[in-house]
Amino acid sequence: MSVEAPLPVKPSPAPQPAAAEAPVRTEIESLYDKYVVPTVNRGLTLVRGRGRQVWDDQGRKYLDLGGGIAVNSLGHAHPAIRETLTKQADVLIHSCNLYYNEWQGRLAQRIVELTGPGKVYFCNSGAEANEALIKLARKFGHESGRFEIITATNSFHGRTLATLTATGQEKIKQGFSPLLPGFVHVPFNHLAAVEAAITPKTIAVQIEGIQGEGGVFTATPEYLPGLRALTQKHNLLLLWDGVQDGYFRTGRWQCYERILQEVPGGESFQPDAIAMAKSLGAGYPMGAMWVREPYQNVLGPGSHGTTYGGSPMACAVALTVLDVVEKEKLMANISARGEQLKQGLQKLVTAGRIKEVRGYGGLVGMVIEKEEPGSVVSRLTKAGLILIPAANHTIRFLPPLNVTAEEIAEALRIVEETI
Ligand SMILES: Cc1ncc(COP(=O)(O)O)c(C=O)c1O
């Protein structure tokens, strides 16, 4: 009888972490990998939207309070916008700026009525609107040899060469030197720093009222009249970048009206020129510069231009947006919804779950220091809420102006459960 030697007992292998597999790319993602210049890290693939909701290519539904970075002022597929787009497509889409078009004239009139006596130049984006501010300043200072523009650190004015030079964030400029000469950055909300930076070559000061990309930092009510007095004293233009914070987003037409709402005499504050874009076309790309009297003709024939700016289609859509904002009382709505949101978030601050809440109306930032904004935004997205990251540990709510109380409550619920 043979006795079989017992088989040596092999220790079972320790569980190994699964080899990191490359995530499977969808067909659309593969098209981007192969054909689209990779300037941005993208997330979802969105296929359709209705109101404040969007759906991705897997059929999942999200509450969209990012508004395409403050653009979708009326949400998705608003019936009035759909109607204007289809009707106008049947009449005149584009004509170019060699000709008059009724819609551009009427929109310019509405913007002047809302802002103050002056004129409007139309373009296609926020960067272009800021570029127009910069060209206005250069032209205004040309004869006296003044060209320097003072802007704020932590600001954001766009990605063209002039506007990224104006931007007060190093990461935006890296790799693009030599930059445009003539820009100086000083700390935001620091009047003495502006005064110290003024030289015989200075022609303008350019600021955002609320630094959106920078993390929702608001100009103080003292800073704005101080800046106005200083620029007047030195015969400088005060250039206002209202691309993100303007257009009713704070519950007023321009955010300086909201910031100075309780300040005696605050209603007399007015910059010399304002850059507008984003919410203006509710998703139809357009930009504009309003410039006040007596500077409204500084940019004369041949000095600036664009093929598409102020097209019949863009202006017809923007006129409809203004009508809807008025008819649906969206200024009051976004003020109230902003308060509701801030009160809800403030409870999380009190509970020590988020650090701070900043902003007004439809431009609110929550500060989370323990985790990168991008990763918090990804977790919120998985939970069904779309928000937008910003600098300085901030996550932005940029909801459409017609967001409802129920949707804000739902967003607060998701934030509370996720963070
Ligand atoms: C304040 C501000 N200015 C300018 C821009 C640039 O606008 P656009 O991306 O339309 O060129 C942005 C964009 O986020 C912005 O927030």
Image (cartoon, rainbow, N blue to C red):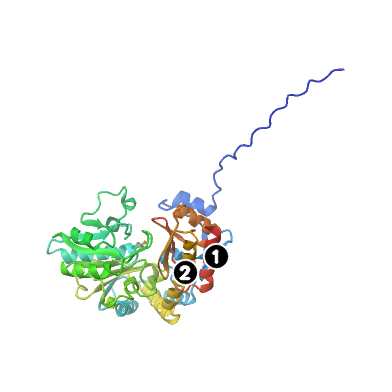
Mark 2 residue crowding within 10 angstroms, few (<14) / some (14–19) / many (20+): some
The kind of secondary structure element at disc 2 is: helix
* Residue 227 coordinates in the image, percent (x, y): 23, 67
Nearer to us: label 2 or label 1: 2
* Residue 319 coordinates in the image, percent (x, y): 38, 77
Residue, x 20% and y 56% (percent of image)?
182
Mark 1 residue crowding within 10 angstroms, few (<14) / some (14–19) / many (20+): few
Q: Quadrant of residue 162?
A: bottom left
Q: In which quarter of the image is residue 336?
A: bottom left
Q: Where 234 falls versus 26 (above or below)?
A: below
Mark 2 sits on what residue? 343
Mark 1 sits on what residue? 413
Is 334 or 370 nearer to us in this picture? 370
| N-term mark: 2 or 1 | 2
Residue, x 27% and y 58% (percent of image)?
187
Q: On the rendering, which quadrant does ligand 1 occupy?
A: bottom left
| Marks 2 and 1 in Cβ contact (< 8 Å) | no
Label 2, label 1: how far apart the Cα atoms are: 13 Å
- Amino acid type of the residue that numbered disc 1 sits on in the rendered structure: Arg
Is 31 or 400 nearer to us in this picture? 400
Query: Ligand 1 closer than 8 Å to the CB at disc 2?
Result: no
Residue lying at the far top of the rendered structure:
1
In the image, 282: left or right of 109? right
Q: Does residue 289 show up?
A: yes
- Amino acid type of the residue that numbered disc 2 sits on in the rendered structure: Gln
* Residue 193 coordinates in the image, percent (x, y): 22, 59
* Residue 75 coordinates in the image, percent (x, y): 47, 70
Q: Where 145 falls versus 37 (above or below)?
A: below
Q: Where 165 falls versus 259 (above or below)?
A: above
The kind of secondary structure element at disc 1 is: helix
Residue, x 21% and y 54% (percent of image)?
181
In the image, 333: left or right of 267? right
